[in-house]
Every structure is written in structure tokens, then in C-alpha cells.
Image (tube, coloured by chain):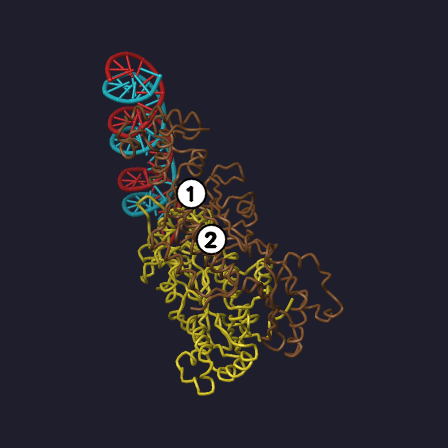
Chain colours: A yellow, B brown, C red, D cyan
Amino acid sequence: MNLSERKKKILSAVVDESIRTAEPVSSKDVQEKYMKEISPATIRNELMALEEMGFLSQPHTSAGRVPTAEGYKKYVEELMTVKKLSKKEADTIKDSFDEKLITLDNILQKTAKTISDATNYASVVYYGIGNSAIVDNILLIKLTQTNTLVVVVTDLGIIKQETKAIDATEEDLRQASKILTNVFKGRRLEEIQDNSNLLTAEIIRYKDIFDAIIHIITERDNDFDKSMAVSGKDNLLNYPEYHDISKLKKTISLLDKKDVLFPLLTSDNGDLEISVRVGGDENLGITDCSIVTASYKSKGKPIGTASVVGPVRMDYGKVVSILKNVTQLLEENIFDKKEIKDD
Amino acid sequence: MNLSERKKKILSAVVDESIRTAEPVSSKDVQEKYMKEISPATIRNELMALEEMGFLSQPHTSAGRVPTAEGYKKYVEELMTVKKLSKKEADTIKDSFDEKLITLDNILQKTAKTISDATNYASVVYYGIGNSAIVDNILLIKLTQTNTLVVVVTDLGIIKQETKAIDATEEDLRQASKILTNVFKGRRLEEIQDNSNLLTAEIIRYKDIFDAIIHIITERDNDFDKSMAVSGKDNLLNYPEYHDISKLKKTISLLDKKDVLFPLLTSDNGDLEISVRVGGDENLGITDCSIVTASYKSKGKPIGTASVVGPVRMDYGKVVSILKNVTQLLEENIFDKKEIKDD
DNA sequence: GTTAGCAGTCTTTTGTTTTGAGTGCTAACA
DNA sequence: TGTTAGCACTCAAAACAAAAGACTGCTAAC
């Protein structure tokens, strides 16, 4: 569907104004704030046409226009301008990554928080561990008499996870650590998940620890809860569309149901860096919110996504800009950097 | 202020009914549901007296009675019965502690979640690390070439925290670990915070790591954010009193401001195991919520608190019971148990 | 193709009336 | 003296009615 320049300008105006005010937009509004050169009556004609095409709708006969999901989509795909972040905004985001982040959990959580703080919406960060991480090191650490910590370090320079096992002397552990590292080093995590045939005669005596390691690796991958971090749910309270508690609940509970969320964050991004799902999308009843997702890569391969969840009336231009910014930082400073710099 | 038995019974009835329905309670309600033997008129007389005494109030002339903050306090302190948990409830709570919990963060977070799930209110768990923990072990773990993880293990059988430092050979680290452990072992964390004079000639060459350790220890203690876990904010959405977004915001933002929250959770529990702050308490404008706090101990000394934050109209009997249950589990299974059992 | 003008629609606002829940008081009663 | 029935009174909530106002779609003129 191709629009005349004027229609584009008017649709843009309506969406911009909707985003700003959360109210239906009248022909007069458009004229006064966006196009003084033509009359409201002319604009009304155009609005009718745009409504005809499915981009706008009226809550009732005598109300102004509101963009439909289609309208928002058109706006996002063709009309909007990605807002450049101010120096200050960019710096704030950059600074927030200077903290020392060790575990994957920390990184995800911190990234989500950075995004939700910057956008004032909710955010979800996902990391698909199964994809590309390669084991670097298996550490066995004696905490107390019968208590051992098992740590898996991957090639991302990041500790994978931690758990607890039992008993063994310190020397024992050193030995086991060496042998197990030998077995796992260089293998991709997804590979390890399947092939339990790594269990050779040599390491059969460390079966306990072996199992713990397998458990660490598979657990994270199968438990959405552990591969996603959510932040900023409270931000939603600030938007009038969520002053209706039932809508608020719906969106918040979407953010809590990681298994429902998962396909929304990962499916068919295709080659797109950024994908936008505008509320009312047929999928799974996300009617009262929009989701903007950006994927990030390590060594050229996509390994996860960062998303913003907010009202359909979202400031897409700003959100896209922030997501691009954050995913770039993630790629450069965290996931494609062996050495994490100290302060 | 001493009440006649009948007044007690009536006040109890009004509070119970308020908790149940969130509506003003009429003399008729009380009569029908709690005391069939006397007439509404008589109850009205008693209600007037109770209002006179400050325990009840009327939203307007022709409405039923609502308990005042004083009324709730009286109820909590003298009238309510602590509800016994069902076997099923108790089991659910118990089971949730069977998971492997390694870091303090994990424990706090998990405990908070358990409480908020069990009560359906919000919860905050605080751990005053400065109090009693004693260093057991300093671990230095080489992750990558120039990247080292510093772990402080305390006598609670719990890893204190973790951070990152730079450079050194594996052998170097082993040495440093031994020497540093020697210096710190057996010392209480609060003692370490002050006495930087531990920095003897012997360990001056490990200044970097030494500083990192001090940093780990002091940071947690000074950063409320790291010594408190909050869970279940979303639960508040379910209560009609919070359908007024401004009240919801107020309470949620209280839960976000750890520095404001802190004195509420820790001050003057005195000898009491449980302290209840009913909204409208003079303190710091907690007008739209109540806070029930239980402290837990290790080796007889209080080391932290677990709290429930919810509407003033809270099911205190149940909440108190759950908090007692959880703090007991914390004490027995986590903080006073060197060996954390494996599954 | 554009625009002024205007009738028509439907929400929002404001005001009025009715209803009904629940009280406090009075007077009678045990 | 404590309890209770009865009743007048109060006030919020609900129901209804009227008025105002925001915008539109359409018509007809430019």
C-alpha cells in the first residue's frame, strides 16, 4: 500500500501526536501542530482515506482518530525517524556497563535494568546459551568440608553458572578439575547436552561432578527463567493506558510467563536487526502492549535478544535507538571481548 | 486501654470482616456473622464506644465502621489468633528451601520469593552482613589470562560475594590465596571493615587483591541494595485498595527505596520476634500499607529480618505464621548449619 | 482539489432525584 | 441498668435528564 507524501505526513502526525498525548487526534490538532498550510477540512478528507485503508480508526463518531495496529506498523516500518540519543543519554548507558559483571545472570539483569531505565518501559533480555558458548575451564572449589562449588567458564570470558556438590579432598578436586576440563574444553554447550557419551572410563570415578556439570549446562538452557532477565515492570504504572488495572495485569503477567514470552522474543527475526510487534498482533493475545526486539551477536552469530515491552503508544523512535545502542555495547564490551577490563 | 470481653469480640469481628471484604462493617454484619445472640442496636452502642476510644471510624455518617490504625494495632497485639498453616502450605514452604543456594544473594532472593508466594503480598528480606559472619576462606580463581575472581567464604558456609581483578600466574594466585586466607580467617566482617591495618609487610605485594576483598566486604554492607531482596510487588495488584494507581505507586516506590525501607525493617524490634507497623504510622508516610517484620538469628544473635508488605487490611494471622515458619527454616537450614546438604 | 459552513452524533459534564444502607436517638422493656 | 425495637435522619451511590462541546461527514461554493 503506497501512500502519497501528504498522507504519509498526516499519518506520521497522528501517530506522533497519539504517542505524545495518549488521546484521539483531531483534524484541527494535526493542522495546528503539524501542517498549518492546509485546512482542517482537507485533512479530514485525508483522514477518512487513511481510515478507509485501515491505518486509523475512531473510538466513536465524534472523536478524533487513533492509529490502528496497522497504522503503528506502517509508522514503524516506513515513516518514523530513529531518534538520536543525546550525549548524556548515551553516556549514562555506557557508564552502566562499566560495573564489574561476572556471571551471566548479572549481565542479563544489568542490561535489562539499563534498558528499562533508559526507555522508561519494561524490558526483557534473553541469552540463548545453547548457541555458541564454548567451555574453557571447569573449576571445583572447596568451600567447606563436604561442600564443593562447581563452576563452568566459557569462552565468552564469563562464568557460566554455579552449583553445589559433595565431599572430596582438596587434592582430589584439583585432579578432577584437570581431567574434567580436559574432557569438556573446546566443546560447545549444545554439543555437550546431547553427548553424555563423554563419560569415559577415565572420569567414571567423577561421575557425581560430571553429572553436576551436565546439569548446570542443560538446566540453564531448558529453564527460560534462567536465560531471561526482566526489568522495569513498575515503569508501566506511569502510562495512562495501564491505569486500567486489568490491562496492567495482563501485560505484567505476560512478562512473568517466560514460556509465553520466549517465542515472542526469538521467532523469525530473520535478518532484521530490530523487530517490532505492535499490540493486537494476532499472536497469543498481546493486545495491550507492543514489543520491540533487537538481537545481538557474538562472532557474527546471533546469541540473544534485548526487548522493550510497553504500551502500543510507545516512543518507537527512541526505543529503537536505545536498543541498537545497548546491543552494540553488549557485543563490543561483553560478548566479543575475552578480557573484561578492570576499572 | 482495657476492653470488656464483648468489646474485644466485636472489635475482632469488625477487623476480621474488614480484612475479608475490604468494606465498612455494619452492626448488622457483625450480628449476623459473629454474634447472633445480641441485637444490632446493642452492637451499635458498643461500636460507638469503640469509635470513641479510637479503634474504629466511619467513612461517613451513614456507613459502617472501619478499623483505625489503632484498631488494627490492638487487634494484632491482643486479639488475633495466629493461624496455623495447613500441612500443604508448610510443605510448599519447606520444599522451596531444598534448592541449592550458594550465594547470599540467592538465599535472600529465594526467601523473599517464598514469602511473597505464600502470603500473596510483597516481601523484603534483609541480611545484616556486618553482624556476625566470620571469614573462612579467600579464594582466587583464574578465569582467563588477566581475569581473576575473588571469592570470600564465611563461616555460614556461604560465599560472601564475588568480583574481578587482574593478572597473575596460577601459582602466584595459590600463594596469595593462602597468605590472604591466613590474614582474614577467623575475623568478623565488621572488624575487617575498620582495621585496614591488617595490611602487613607480608601481604603488601597483594595490595590489589587485598583492596578487592575489603571492597567486597564493605560494599555489601554499605549498599542497601545488595543486602535486601524484594519480591512479589506484583501481588499487590490483586488488592482493591491498590486499584487506585497512586496508592500502588506509593507503596511500590517505598519498596524500591531501600534506604527508606531499611530503618523500617531494622529499628527497635527490641526483643520481639515479630513487629507490626500498621499504615498510618507516624513514620515516613507509610500510609497505604502495613509492614510485618520477623527477625532471624544465627547463634542466638539477630542477623537479619524477613518482612511482608501489603495493604493495611492484611491477613495478619496468616502472615505472622508464615514469617515465623520461614525464619525458623532459615535459621535451622541455612544460617546455623555449616554443611548445606546436597539433594 | 480545497475549503467554509453546518447539521448530526456521541461523549463528557453537570445537575437533580431517588434509593437505600446504616446510623444515633428515644422510649419502652426486663 | 443494660438491652432492644422503632424511627427520623444523613449521606453516598445510582439513576436519570439536560446541556455543552468536540469532531465529524457532507454539501456547496470557490
Residue B304 in view in this figure:
yes
Amino acid bearing label 1: Pro
Residue B158 percent across, percent down from the top left: 54, 64
**Relative depth, front residue between A315 and B173:** B173
Which residue in the structure is indicated by mark 1?
B311
**Relative depth, front residue between B243 and B218:** B218
Q: In the picture shown, does residue A131 fall above or below B97?
A: below
Question: Mark 2, residues whose alpha carbon is within 10 Å: few (<14), some, or many (≥20)?
Answer: many
Question: Mark 1, residues whose alpha carbon is within 10 Å: few (<14), some, or many (≥20)?
Answer: many
The secondary structure type at the circle numbered 1 is: loop
**Relative depth, front residue between B25 and A28:** B25
Residue A111 percent across, percent down from the top left: 52, 63
Q: Is residue B6 left or right of residue B137?
A: left
Residue B318 percent across, percent down from the top left: 39, 46
Mark 1 on the same chain as mark 2: yes
Residue A92, quarter of picture: bottom right
Which residue in the structure is indicated by mark 2?
B327
**Relative depth, front residue between A161 and A260:** A161
Q: Quadrant of the C terminus of chain B?
A: bottom left
Eye-nearest disc, 1 or 2: 2
Residue B329, quarter of picture: bottom left
Q: In the picture shown, does residue A171 fall above or below A65?
A: below
- CA gap, disc 1 to disc 2? 22 Å
Residue A321 in view in this figure:
no
Amino acid bearing label 2: Thr
Residue positioned most to the front: B300
Tell me the residue at 39%/80% (across/down). A194
Q: Is residue B152 left or right of residue B53?
A: right
Q: Chain of mark 1?
A: B
Tell me, yes or no, whether the two marked residues, 1 and 2, touch with CB atoms within 8 Å: no
Q: Chain of mark 2?
A: B
